[in-house]
Amino acid sequence: MWQNKSLLMAVGIVVGGIIIAGVLGTLTTSDSTIIPMSGDVATRAAQLGPLTISVLESGTIQAREKVIIKNEVEGHTSILWLVDEGKKVKKGDLLVELDSSAKIEQKRSMEMQVQNANANLIQAQENLAVVKNQAKSDLAVAELNYTFAKQDLEKYLEGEYPNQLKQAQSAITLAQEELLRSEEKLEWSKRLYNENYLSQTELQQDELAAARDKLDLEQAENNLNLLVNYTHKRNTDQLASNVEQAEMALERAKRKARADVLKAEATLSARKAEYQGNLDKFKYIEEQIEKTKIYAPSDGTVIYATSGGGKHRHWGSEPLAEGTNVRERQELVHLPTTNSVKAEINIHESNLEKVSIGMPARITIDALPDQVFTGHLATVAPLPDPQSMFMNPDLKVYNADIYIESNGVELRTGMSCKAEIVVERHEEAVYVPVQSVIQVKGKPTVYVAKGKNMEQRQVEIGLDNNRMIHIISGLKKGEHVLLAPPLASGEVEADAADFQASVEEQGQKTAKAVPAERDRAKTRKQPGDMKKAGASRPGKRPGGGSGPLGFQNLTPEQREQMRKQRERYENASPEEQVKMREEFQKQMAARFENMSSEQKEAMRKQAQDRRKQFENMSPEEREKLRQGFKGGR
């Protein structure tokens, strides 16, 4: 098929190039708007009458309101039982049963883990109670020791030491009194001894008693000195140290108690988390087992997601059946909740400026060719369809919904349809074929036939419907315009290479027929060079070759056919050449009209790629291309 298209495009380029070369050979593109011409050229009279501007797209019928039932079982699983498609079900009826054997085994294993986690949790709770009790006891002992230490210091400083000091001082006083009496008695004893009233022995006893009392006084004074200068300081330092040690022991007891309790609490928290985590997993597995049986949330008619078509279907999806493997979040069943339906279509980015929400639409169903349904454009996606961009990065379409004004009884989900969005309706409007209007210096221009001359005339244009374009001003009913106007002066350079580029461009325009001029019409509201659009992947062709403009993709038979076609045209009379040109234009237009929107867009992209490829060629490559035109290679 692609080889036929490559041949068709190549033949179009060659024949179109020959046609344009023949026409350009007899034209003079000067600055004057009147250009003489010789020979017959294809023209078309401007028409005055009703004109409808619309956008035609293919699509699929879908339920407007439906419940999408998805697989909520994680991972991949298989279908054990599936309700028949098209069956009417009631709320609560079983729709799908998935394999739950693996989940049941997981449940058994998880149940044991839950029990073990529960035992660890109970142990952690009891351990926390023991730790708290022990911490309380240790803290009470430490506080008591600290209290006793402070009391001992206070008792010594305020009780024991003052008593000991008084006792030492009293002992000195008593010793002094005893020494004084002993000395007085000794004095009397000496007098009596001198007078021979006392014996030597009695005097010696009194002297001994006085010496003993003197020693007692000295000992009492020494005891006081020891108490004040040594014993008191030592006891004070010892008791103060006991208080400090008891205070630090209390602080250690507090910290240890807090650390032990926190450790026990952390262990308990970890055991709780472990238990709760296992319990949640257990409940989740139970929920997963419950979700292996999917019930109808409402009444409706069962439609498999893989057979419903539309934008919800995934490319490459395996049809649903018993034994089919399905993944998590995969759509399984659609349940329409009402009879209202819609048409899901894809609007090409080139038509976005034309359409707007609320525009009326006419819908025809392939399965119901005798009926026409009406509706309106309800939604247009803000971003291109990612699936289409993945399949073809150069193709950007936007998902749109058309609400159909019908109860939907005769319409079924998945039916193919064609939707025509009516953009404008004109009761009387002047219009010409879109290929008759070209851009000259950023201005829409037509070539009007004036006898043997043609007039280059700027016009004001409106929208087009891919076949006819609305002429707002600058052209009257009945005036004939060229169907294949030449390139304007100033857009073609005199050298042979650029002349060949113009031939190639005109050949492509003839091969593309309507779509090239439709692209020009899209830019007329924003004048500018149409070349700025460019091609994102120049040189790519359906055939996959990399030669200039696809000639290297042709077989020897196709090249020979092209050569014979060129010779036939060169050997034909002027009248026959005119007929050949008109016939070729009709064939190309008919082929183009029968193409889908995607095929038209693909052909437009191919033409832009080839034109950009030619513009980027070196002089040597252009010379090689010209030789290819001449030799049919």
Image (cartoon, rainbow, N blue to C red):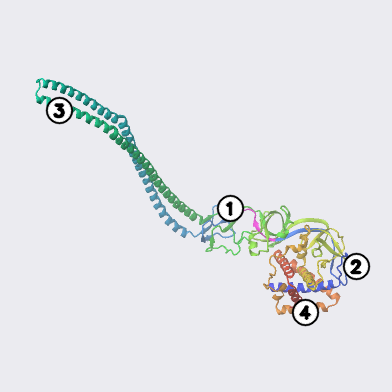
Element type where label 2 sits in the image = loop
The circle drawn on residue 564 is 4
Give the Cα separation between the discs numbered 4 and 2. 34 Å
Residue 225: name its quadrant.
top left
Query: Which region is colored magenta?
Result: 58-68
Tell me the element at label 4: helix
Identify the element where label 3 is drawn: helix
> Which numbered disc covers residue 219?
none
Mark with earlier residue (4, 2) = 2
Q: Amino acid at mark 1?
A: Asp
Label 3 vs label 2: CA separation?
Answer: 177 Å
Q: Nearer the viewer, mark 3 or mark 2?
A: 3
Mark 2–mark 1 Cα distance, whole angstroms, equals 73 Å
Residue at which label 1 appears: 299
- Report if the CB atoms under discs 4 and 1 are less than 8 Å apart: no
Q: Earlier in the sequence, mark 2 or mark 1?
A: 1
Q: Is residue 59 magenta?
A: yes
277 relative position to 209: left or right: right
